[in-house]
Image: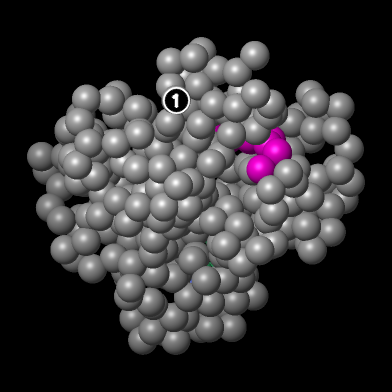
């Protein structure tokens, strides 16, 4: 039996930091409101010239170094993102070129904030099928380029970044289980109204904005993230107390706390980075993983549940022994 295992992790955040105080100068908001309603204190924001693939390449280099491999070893690239450089070619091929490697399959997956979980799950199948020996999996976003900086209900929430992992085959898990889901009936609660076949030719830069019914999204997010975690634990006959760490999607501290409460999990076992990164969509889970691996909290052999929820809605989990 072939399993897949994370061999290395990495992340990259744009240098420019925007604090809540900076946002107070742009929109009618306050540090107090943002902190108490979302938990966000600061977020990294890409410059006009920075591309999502630039963030991905830096995160990938970190993960490659951590795994002790070279870029030439990579035989699959899968990227979860909603903010690729171009409509095509897909961003994974651009990253491949920037890493100086050629020939291996490279594709992207669009599942909003669940993009990394979808990408890692897909990669797990490639590895288990014996087709892939060394995969680069990335969750990345320059979501701030979709932001309307005059809309205080959304501009305070998001940030940019990239998280990467190297995944290799192993004789034992590694990844124990993956569960994905989606329900398109929730489209109207969270979406971006312009796309290739809808109004792209009409839209000028900055004419559109993320549409979100925050309250409604909040409620479904708490319920879904709780259910997703329970499904993963029950499917494997694992008690919540056996978990060493929960790494949830970092959208809002209150959502994270409510999810932990639903699960009966103490916050000491939950990795939280939303205060420093904001909601980085597909990048949030792999960056949180890398933060906790590098600061020594997450150790080899520990049992970790990663889960995410995002526009669509989409959702998913990966249970693994690190
Ligand atoms: O990545 C996955 C998708 N995203 C999410 O999971 C986000 C889910 N939703 C949320 O995190 C929260 O619903 C928000 C943080 C977006 C909003 O928090 P809330 O506690 O649900 O606030 P609200 O939308 O009910 O707004 C409360 C008040 C309103 O004023 P009134 O109508 O009570 O007078 C808003 O106009 O807060 C006002 N408000 C703000 N005030 C200061 C909304 N945004 C701001 C702001 N600063 N930035």
Q: Residue at x 40, y 47 (%)?
A: 64
Q: Is residue 318 magenta?
A: yes
Dot 1 falls on a residue whose secondary structure is loop
Q: Which residue is mark 1?
A: 133
The relative height of residue 135 versus residue 267 in the rendered view (above or below) is: above
The total number of labels drawn is 1
Mark 1 is surrounded, within 10 Å at the Cα level, by few (under 14), some (14 to 19) or many (20 or more) other residues, namely some
Q: Is residue 213 magenta?
A: no
From the image, which quarter does the C terminus lie in?
top right
The relative height of residue 12 versus residue 107 in the rendered view (above or below) is: below
Q: Residue at x 35, y 33 (%)?
A: 74
The relative height of residue 111 versus residue 154 in the rendered view (above or below) is: above
Mark 1 Cβ and ligand 1 under 8 Å apart: no
Is residue 213 visible in the rendered image? The answer is no
- Tell me which secondary structure the magenta stretch mostly adopts: strand
Is residue 299 visible in the rendered image? The answer is yes
Percent position of residue 118, x then y:
50, 32
Residue 146, quarter of the rendered image: bottom left
In the figure, is residue 209 to the left or right of 103?
Answer: right
Figure quadrant, ligand 1: bottom right
Percent position of residue 262, x then y:
82, 48
Percent position of residue 297, x then y:
69, 62
In the figure, is residue 187 to the left or right of 262?
Answer: left
Q: Residue at x 80, y 33 (%)?
A: 233
The front one of 40 and 64 is 64
Percent position of residue 9, x then y:
50, 50
In the figure, is residue 109 to the left or right of 266?
Answer: left
Q: Residue at x 69, y 48 (%)?
A: 300
- Magenta-tinted stretch: 314-322
């Amino acid at each position: 039996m072939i399993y897949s295992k994370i061999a290395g992790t990495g992340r990259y955040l744009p240098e420019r930091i925007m604090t809540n105080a900076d946002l107070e100068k742009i929109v009618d908001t306050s540090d107090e409101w943002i902190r108490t309603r979302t938990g966000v204190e600061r977020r990294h924001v890409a410059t006009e010239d920075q591309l999502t693939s630039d963030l991905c390449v830096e995160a990938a280099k970190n993960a490659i170094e951590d795994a002790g491999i070279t870029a030439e070893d990579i035989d699959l690239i899968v990227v979860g993102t909603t903010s690729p450089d171009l409509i095509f070619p897909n961003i994974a091929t651009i990253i491949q070129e920037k890493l100086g490697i050629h020939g291996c399959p490279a594709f992207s997956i669009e599942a909003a904030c669940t993009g990394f979980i979808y990408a890692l799950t897909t990669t797990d199948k490639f590895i288990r099928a014996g087709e892939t020996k060394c995969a680069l999996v990335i969750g990345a976003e320059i979501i701030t380029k979709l932001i309307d900086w005059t809309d205080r209900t959304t501009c305070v929430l998001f940030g940019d970044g990239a998280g990467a992992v190297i995944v290799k085959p192993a004789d034992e898990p590694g990844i124990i289980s993956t569960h994905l889901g989606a329900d398109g009936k929730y489209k109207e609660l969270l979406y971006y109204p312009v796309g290739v076949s809808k109004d792209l030719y009409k839209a000028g830069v900055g004419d559109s904005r993320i549409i979100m019914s925050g309250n409604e999204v909040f409620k479904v997010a708490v319920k879904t993230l709780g259910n997703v975690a329970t499904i993963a634990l029950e499917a494997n006959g694992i008690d919540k107390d056996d978990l060493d760490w929960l790494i949830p999607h970092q959208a809002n501290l209150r959502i994270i706390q409510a999810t932990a409460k639903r699960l009966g999990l103490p916050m000491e076992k939950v990795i939280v980075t939303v205060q420093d990164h904001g909601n980085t969509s597909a990048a949030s889970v792999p960056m949180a993983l890398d933060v906790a691996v590098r600061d020594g909290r997450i150790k080899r052999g520990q049992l970790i549940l990663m889960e995410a929820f995002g526009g669509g809605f989409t959702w998913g989990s990966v249970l693994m022994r690190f």
